[in-house]
Amino acid sequence: MADLVDIAIPASAQPVAEALGLKVQRSVTSGARIRQIPRDEAELVIEYLQQSGFPARIVEPEPRDRPGTTRAA
């Protein structure tokens, strides 16, 4: 399975990311993120966003966000 990561982006970059066909999730606690995409694709997205003037960075998904993990009740 590919190494899946999240990308943290500013909310103002959401239209640009969506124009690339990516789904952006927004949260009060974690901000705007593109979730669970392959690392090599994430690196290309970050490069494009940075060339467009938006800061973006890869963040490792939190353990609760990783597929196959369970939460305690």
Image: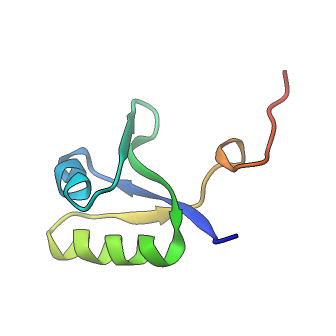
Residue situated in front as seen by the camera: 50 or 20: 20
Picture residue at 40% right of the left edge, 30% below the top: 28
Instruction: Decide if residue 26 is on the left or right side of residue 3.
Output: left
Q: How many marks?
A: 0
Q: Is residue 12 positioned above or below 37 on the image?
A: above
Q: Quadrant of residue 61?
A: bottom right
Q: Nearer the viewer, residue 3 or 8?
A: 3
Residue at position x 43%, y 74% in the image: 41
Colour setting:
rainbow
Q: Position of residue 62 (x, y in %)?
A: 65, 49
Tell me: 49 left or right of 57. Answer: left
Q: Give me the residue at 72% from left, 48% from top.
A: 63
State the quadrant of the C terminus: top right
Residue at point 24%, 52% (across, down): 18
Residue 56, quarter of the rendered image = bottom left
Q: Reply above or below: 16 against 40.
A: above
Residue extending farthest left: 52
| Image location (x, y in percent) of residue 14 | 23, 49
Q: Residue furthest right?
A: 72
Q: Indicate whether 58 appears above or below 6.
A: below
Q: Quadrant of residue 11?
A: top left
In the figure, is residue 3 to the left or right of 48? right
Q: Between residue 42 and residue 2, name the one nearer to us.
A: 2
Q: Is residue 1 left or right of residue 4?
A: right
Q: Position of residue 68 (x, y in %)?
A: 78, 48
Which quadrant is the N terminus positioned in?
Answer: bottom right
